[in-house]
Amino acid sequence: MGKPYSMDLRERVVAAVAGGMSRNRAAKQFGIGISTAINWVKRLDETGSVAPGQMGGHKPKKISGRYRDWLVERCRKADFTLRGLTRELAEQGLQVDVRSVWEFVRAEKLTYKKRRRSRPSKTGRMSRGVGRSGSNTAI
């Protein structure tokens, strides 16, 4: 991830625009993108500062608290699908993506296997393939 531009550059660009220079011309003069100059002036108007916003940081999980407790209980109670759990959470009042549900279920080790591992069939393959009897059918 790139680093934010320096405060000095930001202030010089905004000062040039405030002094009558167009945003487009200021961007060209200082070697930055036009949209960058526009956004810096807009940020100054809205917040009173050209300082960059926070980069990165931790975003808390949506499935927490009572939703977490409900989902753990629900997964242990009966069979489930990820889309079904997503729909049920929406009915509970929490809009999340299937990916969020999958990450939660996986982290909590609540995966549901639909079939147990079974022994291979004793009858083997039922068809010989596309070629004639006795011919080499490898592709």
Image: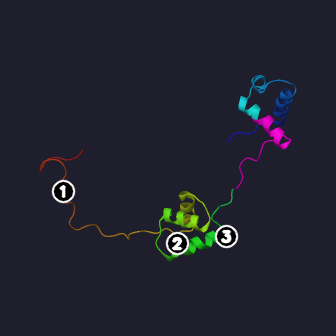
Q: CA gap, disc 3 to disc 1?
A: 54 Å
Quadrant, the N terminus: top right
Q: Secondary structure at mark 1?
A: loop
Which residue has dot 2 on it?
75
Q: Is residue 41 visible?
A: yes
The correct choice, above or below, for 29 with respect to 82 in the image is above
* Kind of residue at badge 2: Cys
**Whole-number angstrom distance, CA of label 1 to CA of label 2:** 40 Å
Q: Which residue is mark 1?
A: 127
Give amino acid for label 3. Gly
Q: Which mark is residue 65?
A: 3
Q: Are marks 1 and 2 in contact (CB under 8 Å)?
A: no
Circle 1 or circle 2, nearest the eye = 2
Vertical placement of residue 15 versus 46, above or below: above
The stretch of residues the image draws in magenta is: 39-58
N-terminal-most mark, 1 or 2: 2
Which disc is residue 43 wearing? none
Residue drawn 18% across the image and 48% down it: 130
**10 Å neighbourhood of mark 3: few (<14), some, or many (≥20)?**
few
Looking at the image, residue 118 sits to the left or right of residue 78; the answer is: left
Residue name at image x 17 percent, y 46 percent = 136
At mark 3, the secondary structure is: loop
